[in-house]
Amino acid sequence: MLIIADRIDATRRYIAQAIASRNREFIQSEVHDQAASGADYLNLSAAIFGRNETVHLRWLIDAVQEATDLPLCLDSRDPAVLREVLPYVKHRPMINAVTLEKGRMEAILSLAIDYQAKLIASCQDVNGPAETADAKVEIAARLIETITAAGIQPGGLYIDPLVYSLSTNQQSAKATLEAIGRIMVSYKGVHTICCLSTVSYGLPVRSLIHRTFLAAAMDRGLDSAIIDPTDRQLFATLKAGELITGRDESCLGYIVAYRKGRLE
């Protein structure tokens, strides 16, 4: 299971304050915590700064890479911002995310090819985000066709079916789970990914919802997630899920996590 750590996101007030004040020590403390908790990638977002996104994201990249060799997932909807900051990324990056909006698709695909970036593709087109399972799968098919035709290999493509908060759409999790299963069966080599924080927005005991959705999604084939790996119970659910779904050969990952005291 690929873990993309989500904590260094300027939509979090304390992260925005640290970026704006150039608090390198605080940001690097977040980096160390997430790296020690099992992150494979670090998701970085400074989009909340609007017209100043480029300068803040550039600073953030430098601060983070000074503290870790983990690869970065750059979370920006603006191809111009990505074009400015990608030359400063040391390791093969991931771009989060592209949709079927034509102008943006072409620009981000060009960048992904130039920098050999992995790509998160969200199930959204000119009519907006997909809501039903059928719509998610139909858009996923178009995304996969367009992106692979441009030269991105299936193994570098992560389809996000887009799960919405259950507080506003009680059927979203169910539709997303169905879509994950259908995509993973129909498109061998392509990955699926979800951002867990969206499914629980506006509801109490959010971590319980995250754990439950993650376990159900892994059963459908989900093989990557944007999560907070420092959430010990969530991480334990992920390790148990890998074991139960047959992805943990000889139970090694589960046993190592236990010996490190990471299972709750």
Image: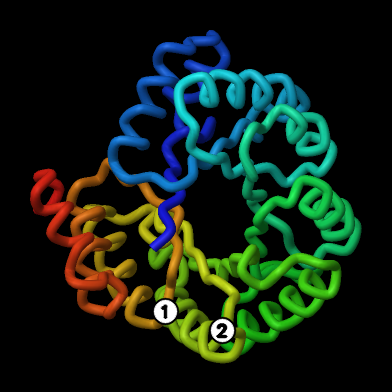
Image location (x, y in percent) of residue 203: 31, 56
On the image, the x and y values in percent for residue 105 come to 83, 60
Marks 1 and 2, how far apart at CA? 9 Å
The crowd level at tag 2 (other Cα within 10 Å; few <14, some 14-19, many 20+) is many
Question: Mark 2 sits on what residue?
Answer: 183
Image height check: is 123 above or below 51?
Answer: below
Circles 1, 2 touching at the beta carbon (< 8 Å): yes
Residue 234 circle label: none
Q: Disc 2 residue type?
A: Ile
Could you tell me which quadrant the N terminus lies in?
bottom left
Residue 150, percent from left and from top: 85, 68
- Find numbered disc 2 in the image and state the secondary structure of the residue it sits on: helix
| Along the line of sight, the residue nearer the viewer: 240 or 215 | 240
The residue shown at (75%, 65%) is: 152
The residue that appears at 43% across and 58% down in the rendered structure is 2
Three-letter code, disc 1: Gly
> Residue 102's quadrant in the figure?
bottom right
Label 1 secondary element: loop
Nearer the N terminus, badge 1 or badge 2? 2
Q: Which residue is mark 1?
A: 221
Front residue (pair 223, 106): 223
